[in-house]
Amino acid sequence: MSEFQNKAVRLTVACGGAASVTNIAECQKRFLAAALELNRALEHRTDHPVDRSLVGAGATRRIDLIIGDLMKELAVVGHLFDIDIMQAGHNTLDRRMEEIKGALNRS
């Protein structure tokens, strides 16, 4: 696992105990809450039909803080499935670049 992912898992355990990184339902809920908060912040709408029990009411936080929370939760999900999220991201970028190069070469 990447240094970032290991740090995210340690932080989550420190804040919520060992069960906070082994309970898939809790991980899913935290990830969804962070994703919904980011969606709300990007839309700049207060009337968006979002489940308030997941996101909560009040002012939107800064985008960088929301993205950080989302990345932390993604790291915990990756930990649950023994996936290095940074390597997975690099693999996807490399694969997409090869697809684009191939498409350009064919045209």
Image (tube, rainbow, N blue to C red):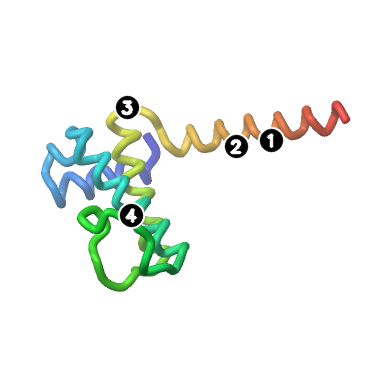
Q: Nearer the viewer, residue 9 or 80?
A: 80
Image quadrant assignment for residue 100: top right
Q: Residue furthest right?
A: 107
Of label 4 and label 3, which has the lower sequence position? 4
Q: Residue visible at 60% across and 37% down?
A: 93
Disc 4 and disc 1 in contact, CB within 8 angstroms: no
Categorize mark 4 by other alpha carbons within 10 Å: few (<14), some (14-19), many (20+).
many
Q: CA distance from mark 4 to mark 3?
A: 19 Å
Of label 4 and label 1, which has the lower sequence position? 4
Which residue is labeled 4 in the image?
69
Of label 2 and label 4, which has the lower sequence position? 4
Which residue is labeled 2 in the image?
93
Q: Position of residue 99 (x, y in %)?
A: 71, 29
Q: Residue visible at 24% across and 40% down?
A: 27
> Which quarter of the rendering shows the C terminus?
top right
What's the amino acid at mark 1? Answer: Met
Q: Nearer the viewer, residue 43 or 69?
A: 43
Q: Position of residue 74 (x, y in %)?
A: 36, 42
Q: Nearer the viewer, residue 51 or 25?
A: 51
Which residue is labeled 3 in the image?
81
Q: Residue furthest bottom?
A: 59
Disc 2 and disc 1 in contact, CB within 8 angstroms: yes
Q: Residue visible at 23% across and 62% down?
A: 56
Categorize mark 2 by other alpha carbons within 10 Å: few (<14), some (14-19), many (20+).
few
Q: Secondary structure at mark 2?
A: helix
Q: CA distance from mark 2 to mark 1?
A: 6 Å
What's the amino acid at mark 2? Answer: Leu
Q: CA distance from mark 2 to mark 3?
A: 20 Å
What's the amino acid at mark 3? Answer: Phe
> Which quarter of the rendering shows the N terminus?
top left
Which residue is labeled 1 in the image?
97
Disc 2 and disc 3 in contact, CB within 8 angstroms: no
